[in-house]
Image (cartoon, rainbow, N blue to C red):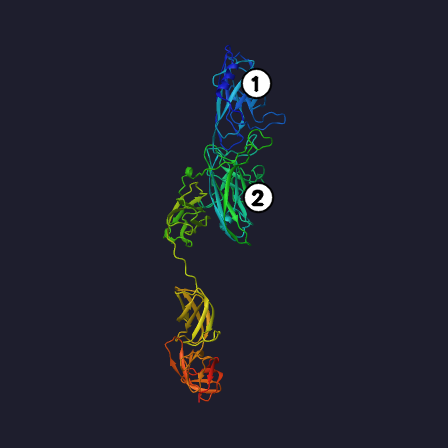
Amino acid sequence: MMKHSLGFFALLAMMAVPASATMQCNLTGVPLQVSSEGLAEPLGAILLQCGGGPPNGVLTGSFQIFVSRRVANSLTETGNYLGITLSQEFPGSIFIDQPATIRPLGDSILIENFQIVMNAQGFFSIKFGGIRAETSQTTQAYLQFTGNQQLNVGIFYVTVAFPQSTLLATHTGAGAAGLGPVLPSPPDFNAMIAARVPMATTRITEGWAHAFVPRKGNDTNGTRIMIRLSGVPEGAKIFAPDAVSGSGTIQPTQSGDMGSYPTSGLYAFNPVTGSLLMSRIRYSAPDGSGGFPAFYPNYVGANSLAAASEADVARGTPYLVYETMDANPSQRDTVQIPIWVVLPTDKHVTPSVIKQTLTLAPLSTEAGSVTGAPIPRFRPAPIASDCALLGDCAAPYFPKMTVTQPEVNEFTAPAGSGSVNGYFLLHNTGASLLEWRVAVRLKGAATGWLTVSPETGFNNRTIRFDMFPAGLPVGRYEGEIVVQQIGAPTGINTEAVVPVYLNVTPPLPPPIPLPSITEILDAANRWPMPEAPGSLIVITGTNFGENTSITIGGKLARIVLLTPTEMLVEVPLDVATGRAEVVPANSSRPGPVTAMDIVPIAPATLYVLNSDDERNSEEHPALAGKPIQVFVTGIRGAAQPLSLKIHDRYLDGEITATDQPGVDLVKFIVPDDFPTMPSVVLVCALPAGGGEAACSHPKDIWVKEAIQ
């Protein structure tokens, strides 16, 4: 691209105009409003009027036009510019094109091989037109002449184009979820509305009056817009009208989700004013070029615009291209384009948001004279909303984000503890589709202690936030959950803030480990066996301590002796017979449950004392004819008297209570005729309430014959 300073052109003008020049000229321009997105926009005409020349003289030579942006006219096979003209004014203010060679010369336009005939007063007026250029900025043209006559031009540059956005637009999004409905047949406007097919709407408005221009002259197309859709679920189909009519027609197309009743629209040709009509372009290239109109109007009578058809698809992305077929150059029009999303009926679609990207078309990134490139063409550019122009930015048919603050937003947790969570509600209290994202903003140096879920979504949702005190020192922490609307149809994204406070207190003492039972054994023989109410049992396991308690059958049991791995326990007297759960606990924190069998009586001999209170043994035998003391557990529910068997004799014994938990005493006299010998003693009993007898395991004893 060639850029020139005014000083440089002033120097050119001085070199071209000697002091003896007699023709005085005035250079003017007719600046056009053009698209700021355009890469090949038409520039306004350049008018040169000169006087003081020879009567009926002939002007020959060459003009060179420098444009401040890159010239974009196509070139012919011979290398000449296509569409640029040199015309002369004749009486009646009629400009007639003159033969000339117009070709590029470096970064300028060279016009030569022409003859301009002056009138009888030595005056002529010529116009340069048809120039196209990239127009992202205000565009100026500079004129230089070399030839048989010197032309004195006071101001040799003119403004020929002012850029402005061609297009304003507002989208309402669509959410896709679930199944179907079934595609109507035929899939026209009214059938789609009746079937309640999910719909999005694109509303477009001209950036200025007559920004949308029908195809004309050397243009390859009229003003086109292209809508590309993302987020379309697999198997879904996109449909749109074959044609839409704008606000100046007898019945504009209305989708029904922007505050008006849905109607497909009617178009009637008005040869005086024109009215906005846009047709779908079928089978266009992915850049929006080529293809053919799906709808050609009948220029007699009203045209119904109810027909609809499926979108074109490129690389999995559906897209729609609409071209201006008719327009009213004197007013700024707006038009709505409904877009239907037909979901599959055989596969459930998980919730997704279908988004629209709107651009002018054809799209290109190439400025300048590009062989075979469409005219006009446009670069991708962001599109501003038209709601401010139309005065409906606050309309109820657009989404409105409302955040309900949580009931509690200040939390307390000890350092090192697990996560703490809270919730708040996010609502769309308007219409259409509300998209949002949620982020965390923390105050202070601490990071990572606050998270949210989910971070993105649409419409109504409960938002969960989690706080993590585990890695935080004692103190107070402040954060904010920022909820932002995204992709608002109006371009105005609202924001809400949820404050969150976390007070981290000193850590709690480490938790007492849970007790666990390994085995439940009889206290007399350390065998696993059924036990009776009042029996002494041994429980082995882990993590037993001073805060340990134990329940049997839901009854709190007495712990007689305790070590970290073993306890001597008295079975509660009021425990029910049958299968009983045994539950250890440390400071009321229960450990794993074990089970044992409870029977009415379970005699078990703990130890035997002789009459002198010495423990019976081979070294200390019981004397025949003397009393012997048998200490037994498991007989609290036994009937009196008990039956004892020593050697081959059966004896009766009475139960005597002791001050030891779970232990009862049974005394009997060793028969006086027993010789010195080892023997065994068994304790047998009947339940006091009736039932089967039970005996203890044999207990070894030693007897010494009586001294004669």
391 in relation to 450, above or below: above
Q: Amino acid at mark 1?
A: Ser
Q: Quadrant of the C terminus?
A: bottom left
Front-most of residues 545 and 486: 545
Farthest top residue in view = 20
Label 2 element class: strand
- Residue 702: where, in percent of width, then height? 47, 82
Front-most of residues 484 and 675: 675
Q: Around disc 1, counting alpha carbons within 10 Å, would you say few (fewer than 14), some (14 to 19), or many (20 or more)?
A: many
Q: Quadrant of the N terminus?
A: top right
| Image quadrant assignment for residue 292 | top right
- Which residue is labeled 1 in the image? 62
Q: Is residue 440 visible?
A: yes
- Which residue is labeled 2 in the image? 313
| Image quadrant assignment for residue 365 | top right
Farthest right residue in view = 77
Q: Around disc 2, counting alpha carbons within 10 Å, would you say few (fewer than 14), some (14 to 19), or many (20 or more)?
A: some
Front-most of residues 538 and 220: 538
Label 1 element class: strand
Residue 440 as seen in the image, left or right of residue 97: left
Mark 2 to mark 1 CA distance (whole Å): 50 Å
Dots 2 and 1: beta carbons under 8 Å?
Answer: no
Identify the mark nearer the N-term, 2 or 1.
1
Residue at x 44% of width, y 73% of height: 537
- Residue 693: where, in percent of width, then height? 46, 83
